[in-house]
Image: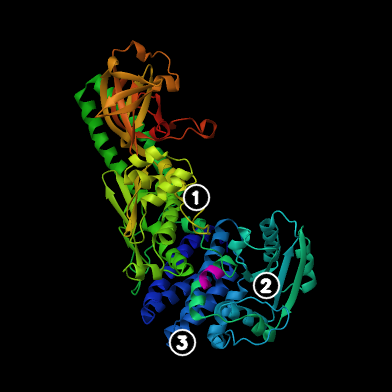
Amino acid sequence: MELSQYLSMFIDESKEHLQSLNENLLSLESNPQDISIVHNIFRSAHTLKGMSATMGFEDIAALTHEMENVLDLVRNSKIEMNPFIFDCIFKSLDSLESMVEDIIQGGTGKADVSPIVVALRSIVTGDYKTAQAPAVTAAKEPAKGIEVDEFQFSILQQSIDSGFLVFYIEVSVNENCVLKAARAYMVFDALEQMGEIVKATPSVQEIEQEKFDRSFSLYFISKVDQVTLEKEILNVSEIQSAVIITVDSESLAELSRPRTEVEAARQEIAAAVAEGIAPAVSVEAIHNVEPATAAAKPAAGGAPVASRTIRVDIERLDALMNLFSELLIDRVRLEQLASEVKRNDLTETVEHMSRVSSDLQNIVLKLRMVPVDSVFNRFPRMIRDLAKSLDKKVDLVITGAETELDRTVIDEIGDPLVHLLRNAVDHGIESISDRLAAGKSEQGTIQLRAFHSGNHVFIEIEEDGRGIYREKVLKTALKNGLVTAEQAAKLSDLEVYNLLFASGFSTAEKISDISGRGVGLDVVKTKIQMLGGHVQVDSKPGFGSKFSVQLPLTLSIISAMLVRLGSEKYAIPLSSIVETSAIQKQQIRNIHGNKMVDYRNTVIPLVSLSTLFNVPDFDEDLEEETEIVVVRKGDKQVALMVDEFIGQQEIVLKTLGKYLSGLFAISGATILGDGQVALIIDPNALIK
């Protein structure tokens, strides 16, 4: 049987089942006694196992089978869920997502999941209860060892019992080595080709930032012998030595020192994600959202809901959109011809066609609309893992997930929202002790909201954390030379908060893998502006902050103002226009060589589009009265000089192709009803 034709269906349904597993597992973690949720999880795992076995993806089928065995015991009340079992199943889902992603990229979907399989089997046999770090005894060499938590200890112990080789490795780099982190990375990369790194000290993040002296230690599971390991490590240049000791059950008990339950809870997610037990929850994984969700998902705690939907390939929707674009161009042309010919029967027919095509346009656009839930649904798991790694308690409340956006916008919005949410958890929500000291509940709350307003969608991220302190932001801004002391004194609070979006700006006192590198909010602002939207922040020190993102409903068909410059036509998106007006030549000021114009009790720059685009047959110096279009980007405004207003029109946005990419202040082009091409001006690029 030829299975390749079913691959896209397998990928779509696998992603739906994995998302359902994540959502139901989070619900079960909040309510461990609800067996109905366990039944839903079991059904999804069983379906995924059957699908993957049919398609020949044996590693996925094997891992889901081991998950089934654990879930079967839970649903039959033979064992109870606990933090260890939750972590094992969450890490199993991470591995399943990684394998499905490999299949999407054209791979085989194979992966070494033996450490996780060993952990799941230990739950079924009950060995995980006894496979915990014992009391400290006198250690044999090496004297130091590495502290591991309950989960990591169980992985190592069960790997030994299953016939794998477990090594304790200490690597030292040369004393005069300049790029210690790079050499350490090369060692890690070589080892990961031969097995699994379970635990490293210092952590991977600290090693990447060169926060170690000359040596680092790790536990390593493999089937490769000790001689081969030593050879591969020493093949890396500037490595001085590698001490490799084979670990058995007795020496493992001596080398791994127990930690308190609180310490284990604080570090288990960070250690497991960073050091290779399971793939990290990365921005790419979170952003890998489905463009459309066609099949109904089982509701948490209930039976699957019948669905009257079908799957449609995105390429077919794109083809439909392109065909309608051509129809829209011809419709405008027919309207022009009908107005010239002035025959009643032709006019009536064209008007009827316009009404029908407008309805068709709405349907085509709605077909491309996707609920933001397809982006939001991955965030609860991300927030859970981040909060646990930072030893914080965070409740993510999502409202308006049914709000719809065009898939072109949906595909791009995931990254900025990930940055904002990670900042909210790390910078916004305080530690438990700080919250209690401030008289707050120990659990912080992050509100993620989406709603329509006019032709835009607003997404808000609001938290009840420490808020943004004006003095701290200004101190960093002054230090980085973003503002002068005189300017700083005149800035409003809102203007100060918006300095956070400056390139390289960071108020983090220490750099981590979550934040503090000074690139996050700058990336957010740039990405959102590329989508034709804007972002702003408001805050109340001590009570929290709110980031508001405004996005256009669609990027394919936009309303625009057509203007003329000489013999050429240009389009300006209506979403950026504040006002159109006409000014007299004597109203134009010349300040420090720049043209300015009075506008509503302020002075704004005046930009000559004819000069900017080198338009022939147009000289605004000969005009006594000039039409202007006032456009806005955030809180900044600019007046654009044009020759003539043509009128408002819905236009189809066409890209200029790779040969004309990167043109300044031009975002694309459109074909008008008379066959002419009009370039679309990008006001965001003009205002800097």
Q: Residue at x 67, y 82 (%)?
A: 160
Using a 10 Å C-alpha cutoff, classify the residue at mark 1 as few (fewer than 14 neighbours), some (14 to 19) or many (20 or more): some
Vertical comparison of 428 with 200: above or below: above
Residue for point 70% across, 79% down: 143
Does 579 sit above or below residue 102?
Answer: above
Membership of 617 in magenta stretch? no
Q: Quadrant of the N terminus?
A: bottom right
Q: Quadrant of residue 252?
A: bottom right
Between 474 and 277, the one nearer to me in the picture: 474
Q: Position of residue 621 (x, y in %)?
A: 36, 12
Identify the amino acid type marked 2: Phe
x, y percentage for residue 485?
A: 40, 40
Q: Quadrant of residue 557?
A: top left
Q: Which residue is mark 2?
A: 220
Q: Secondary structure at mark 3?
A: loop
Q: Nearer the viewer, residue 577 or 657?
A: 577
Frontmost of labels 1 and 3 is 1
Q: Secondary structure at mark 2?
A: strand
Q: Amino acid at mark 1?
A: Gly
In this rendering, does residue 369 appear at all? no
**Mark 3 or 2, closer to the camera:** 2
Query: How far from the left and from the top, in percent, is residue 665?
Result: 44, 30
Query: Residue at (41%, 75%) from the top-left corner?
Result: 29
- Among the 4 quarters of the image, the one containing residue 669: top left
Q: Residue 439 appears at what percent x and percent y? A: 31, 69
